[in-house]
Image (spheres, grey):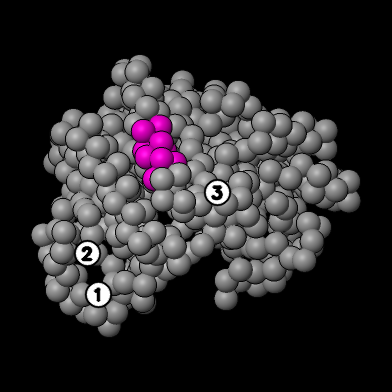
Amino acid sequence: MKLQQGKSDYLFERAKKVIPGGVNSPVRAFKSVGIAPKFIKQGYGCKIIDEDDNEYIDYVCSWGPLILGHANEEVLKEILIASMKGTSFGTPTEKEIKLAEIICEAVPSVDMVRLTNSGTEAVMSAVRLARAFTGRNKIIKFEGCYHGHSDGLLVKAGSGAMTTGVPDSAGVPQDYAANTITASYNCTEQVEKIFKIHGDEIAAVIVEPVAGNMGVVVPGIDFLKYLRKAADNYGSLLIFDEVITGFRVAYGGAQSYFNIMPDITVLGKIIGGGLPVGAFGGKKEIMRLVSPEGPVYQAGTLSGNPVAVAAGIKTLEILRDNHDIYDILDRKGALIEEAFKSASNEYQIPVKVNRIGSMLTVFFTDIDVVDYRTAMKSDRQAFSKYFCLMLEQGVYVAPSQYEAIFVSAAHGEEEIEKTTKAINNTFRKMKG
């Protein structure tokens, strides 16, 4: 179909006059795909409609949290009821307790949880808590894993695994990054070397148990097990950043899927039903260090606000009470994965598809993608062409090679079939 785009183009130019880059989060600018972004005015089910009235099947799903689809009626009802009673009080509410109870019941490693306003805030607080609990300063993170934009975690690898972190953003002091050591995802050997050198200084290892911010990269069979063992051996904590995977990969998160228990878990996305929220939690002996019970300060006026909490409770209740929902989501994801593989074989366009459940990434490369280095070998020009061709056929995927496709409960057989046809047509046109 021929997309109408006049109003989105106009809005983008207007936005650039008052918002840096015209967007409030960088990937929205569509820079990596070489076109102007689409301004969205409405979403329903698995569809979104832009300001030029183009309709798309949406596989971004607000970057993951809309596992039930856009404007789910049950969730909207709870949002409406909550908002009519008041949007924020800055005081405790009963629903905060209920959401916390659901999370503690669902996530195996969490006895207590503190709600925040975003994943970035939750990660920042989790790292502070780990440092307080261990009395140490250094953190190990993995190249390609994104843990929000707090200063100490905006770090990329240096020339080797043991190189002290170099800030990955202007405005981050070197001193902030000095306590962050970066290793390659899925590489236990590098982590082992780091621990041998800095073991008594490492407060925590933080990892996405399934990487989602260099595209989907699934951990090797022994990678997470090794991190658990290494952290125990050296008296460090293991932090799972489950902002993406929590309640997405499985109801209990990636930790229940892999049966690996972290010391601290960071959550976000789905637990607010698509509204701004975050959380961090863990065992009582760790969480009781958080203020006002302990000396680790963390606060937020809008933390646990009644509207986001209401949306989160209803979303998690639906996931909890529909036992087959994850199997259904997995089958939908498998159909899309197979469509990519089939088109790749038919038109001889090399791709690697990494998938776990309802999240997947198609990498335009002929090598297995197991870490940041291999992800970066993908053909970004091919991805850009693929993205534009899919968009023209009414299928909206993330405008970056290094993001995920998210399937929701609202994606039906008709939409999956249309997506499969669009993938085939796209690969055919790319080959031609």
Q: Residues within 10 Å of mark 2 (few under 14, many from 20)?
A: some
- Tell me where the magenta segment starts and ends, as one range: 334-343
Asked if the residue at tag 1 contacts the one at tag 2, i.e. Cβ–Cβ closer than 8 Å, the answer is yes
Indicate the secondary structure of the residue bearing disc 3: helix
Between residues 332 and 312, which one lies in front from this camera angle?
Answer: 332
Q: Is residue 168 visible?
A: yes
Q: Position of residue 168 (x, y in %)?
A: 61, 68
- 265 over 429 or under it: above or below: above
- Horizontal side of 82 relative to 187 (left or right) equals left
Q: Position of residue 415 (x, y in %)?
A: 22, 39
Q: Residues within 10 Å of mark 1 (few under 14, many from 20)?
A: some
Residue position for label 1: 12
- Horizontal side of 210 relative to 383 (left or right) equals right
Q: Main secondary structure of the magenta part?
A: helix
Between residues 391 and 177, which one lies in front from this camera angle?
Answer: 391
Circle number at residue 123: 3
Residue position for label 2: 39
Q: Position of residue 88 (x, y in %)?
A: 27, 47
Residue at 40% from the left image edge and 32% from the top image edge: 334
Between residues 54 and 162, which one lies in front from this camera angle?
Answer: 54
Q: Hey, which quadrant is residue 2 in on the image?
A: bottom left
Indicate the secondary structure of the residue bearing disc 2: loop
Q: Does residue 242 belong to the magenta stretch? A: no
Residue at 31% from the left image edge and 72% from the top image edge: 35
Quadrant containing the N terminus is bottom left
Q: Say whether disc 2 or disc 1 marks the residue closer to the N-terminus.
A: 1
Q: Residues within 10 Å of mark 3 (few under 14, many from 20)?
A: many
Q: Residue furthest bottom?
A: 17
Q: Amino acid at mark 3?
A: Val
